[in-house]
Amino acid sequence: MAEALLEVNDLKVAYGGIQAVKGVTFAVRAGELVCLIGANGAGKTTTLKAITGVQPVGAGEIRFKGRSIKGQGPWELVKQGLVMVPEGRGVFARMTITENLQMGAFTREDNEIEADIDKVFGIFPRLKERRHQLAGTMSGGEQQMLAMGRGLMARPKVLLLDEPSMGLAPIMVDKIFEVVSDIHQRGTTILLVEQNASRALQLATRGYVMDSGEVTMTGEPKALLSDPKVRAAYLGE
Ligand code: ATP
């Protein structure tokens, strides 16, 4: 089995007195699309924030490419290839699409940025059509595409996607899951956090279930999809 690209070991994160993540352990190997599912407040976003240096780690260990990254800031981590597309997208509303994509490459010093913008336009033709439009005037689905495109501009080794389908119309949800699968098939390793458990598990190579700050189940997506506990709790059965 390939060595893990990202390893989270007994991670604990608290907000003041509230223990949001209570000792979470999981791994993502190169080439995988791992999904993390769970109800509201399970601690999924907090886990991603701790991995990417946005939220301080209380205890435990996080290793990326075999080395501890605990205590490193978001900028350093993005530069190394650990890139998050946050919940709610966070596009720069008063910048154009092209400018937002350029911002995604702010840690890079090579001269292939324009070529990569063209690649992103290849994945998201809609962004190319609208490249001069201000990001804040785009629909939720288009902003999600832009946020993912901006993430790709950092040339991620692992792309962490936080609830990309949240709040989108069904047709856009279909499109976003198609694109997540496309990005994975083009060779990017992905850690996908989703409340849409069924759709996420259909794409994933492996899944983890989080509940109240802990990983409660893990396994092959097919096994999780057919598990009665998962079906009852997360698939509305
Ligand atoms: P959701 O799907 O609703 O985003 P989640 O699984 O991502 O849920 P988190 O957002 O990580 O869950 O939240 C885990 C717990 O931490 C929740 O009880 C939440 O209320 C709490 N929490 C999250 N952010 C903060 C914060 N900034 N300050 C205090 N408590 C927080």
Image: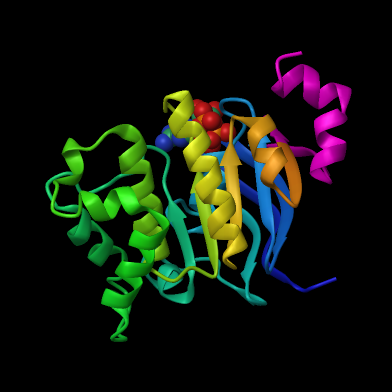
- The part of the image, by quadrant, that contains residue 138 is top left
Asked if residue 216 is among those painted magenta in the image, a careful observer would answer yes
Q: Nearer the viewer, residue 113 or 125?
A: 125
Q: Position of residue 45 (x, y in %)?
A: 52, 41
Left or right: where 212 falls relative to 141: right
Q: How does the figure colour the protein chain or chains?
A: rainbow
- The segment highlighted magenta reads 210-237
Residue 203 % position (x, y): 68, 45
Residue shown at the point (20%, 49%) measured from the top left: 130
* Up-down relation of residue 122 to residue 204 (above or below): below
Tell me if residue 164 can be seen: no
Q: Quadrant of the C terminus?
A: top right
Position of 44 relative to 185 (above/below): above
48 over 163 or under it: above or below: below
Whether residue 79 can be seen here: yes
Nearer the observer, 95 or 229 = 95
Tell me if residue 223 is in the magenta stretch: yes
Taking the spot 48% from the left edge, 25% from the top edge, the residue there is 170
Image coords of residue 44 (percent x, y):
58, 40
